[in-house]
Amino acid sequence: MKLFFIAMGVAMILMVYTPRPSQAELYFGDALLLSEQPPSGHGGDHGKQGRRGSAQGHAEHRATAERTWYLNRHDLHTGAEARVLRSDGSQAAGVLTHGKDGWSFIVDTKPLDGSLDGVFTLSVIDRAVSDGILTVRAPKVNMINHSCGWGHTFKFDQERIKPKIDAALPLEIVAENLWDRNFHSKTMSGDRLVVQVLRYGKPAPNAAVSFTTGSGWTRTVAADEEGKASVQLIRDYYPETWSLFDARKQSTVLVTAVVEAPEKGAYLGQSYTRTRLVATLPWRYVPQRSEYTSSVYGLGIAALFAVASGAGIYAYRERRKRPCREVTFDERT
């Protein structure tokens, strides 16, 4: 019995003093994620949102000369690289640096004259071999470089509106129909988010694709033969009262794709017999318009009906009026 209590005491001490993973580690696991918030800003909602901004906090439609992007983890390996595919299709260098906020790289968006108006594709490739498995992590994000002051020269240019495909990525998630022709993000709750998983620019069938919202809801599906997968974004915004409802409230969704295969090779002198590829893509969505316009439409229709009814009753009564007929009696007759 004495040994039992000693064992229990040791177990409790280990539970107390054993380092526990952070909330971000529990939520994201070993996957890498790109964000305009440093690692301390990550949590259950994939980072903070700015007013009319991206899921990372930068206010879109207010172009700046450069923007800094951070990785949620500090464990990058030798040979990790950042890639920047600009809106005009040109490739730019991305230099990874490590500072007090972890790993980051700066995206140069100059010149600020509208010539680079459109969607940038930013990504990182990190490789490492452990226990005979080559793990490749490839986080990606789509960034709008746009200023309304530039006009909308490319509003009818589909190539500027849709994300570019980077065929050099070992695994990539490409989403469809994210913006309208004025570069406004248009994804709403209730919409179906469709993505395609590509491996070096080619479809990756049967990839495991997970959709996880900031509220913690998740669903995993298998990509079809074209590498496509989709999910309907559920409504997960329920303020306590109607007065607190924010029509611009941005919820977030993180798309994660995983492909595993028995492949042999060597990387940096280390051999492997299996590969595991992990790609991520964060996005955001706002409440469906019907959630905050239905009552307005209903009141409007009711008001129109009341006005029309009143006008009809008034017109009917006016038509029913008869002129007063004066009757004169002649007493002499």
Image (spheres, rainbow, N blue to C red):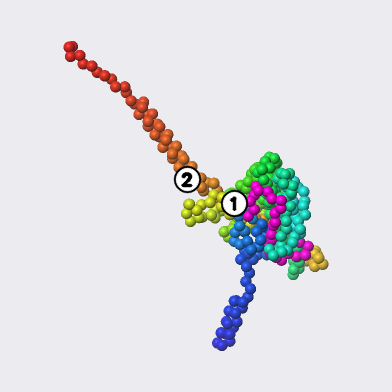
Residue 40 point in image, percent of width and height:
64, 63
Q: Is residue 26 magenta?
A: no
Residue 97 point in image, percent of width and height:
74, 61
In contact (CB < 8 Å): disc 2 and disc 1 = no
Amino acid at the residue labelled 2: Ser
Viewer-proximal residue, 106 or 65? Answer: 65
Q: Residue at x 73, y 56 (%)?
A: 106
The Cα–Cα distance between marks 2 and 1, rounded to whole angstroms, is: 25 Å
Q: Is residue 58 magenta?
A: yes
Q: Residue at x 63, y 69 (%)?
A: 21
Residue 248 point in image, percent of width and height:
56, 50
Residue 90 point in image, percent of width and height:
77, 48
Q: Residues within 10 Å of mark 1 (few under 14, many from 20)?
A: few
**How many marks do you count on the picture?**
2
Instruction: Name the image quarter holding residue 317.
Output: top left
Which quarter of the figure is the N terminus placed in? bottom right
- Read off the residue under disc 1: 51
Q: Residue at x 68, y 52 (%)?
A: 142
Residue interval drawn in magenta: 57-80
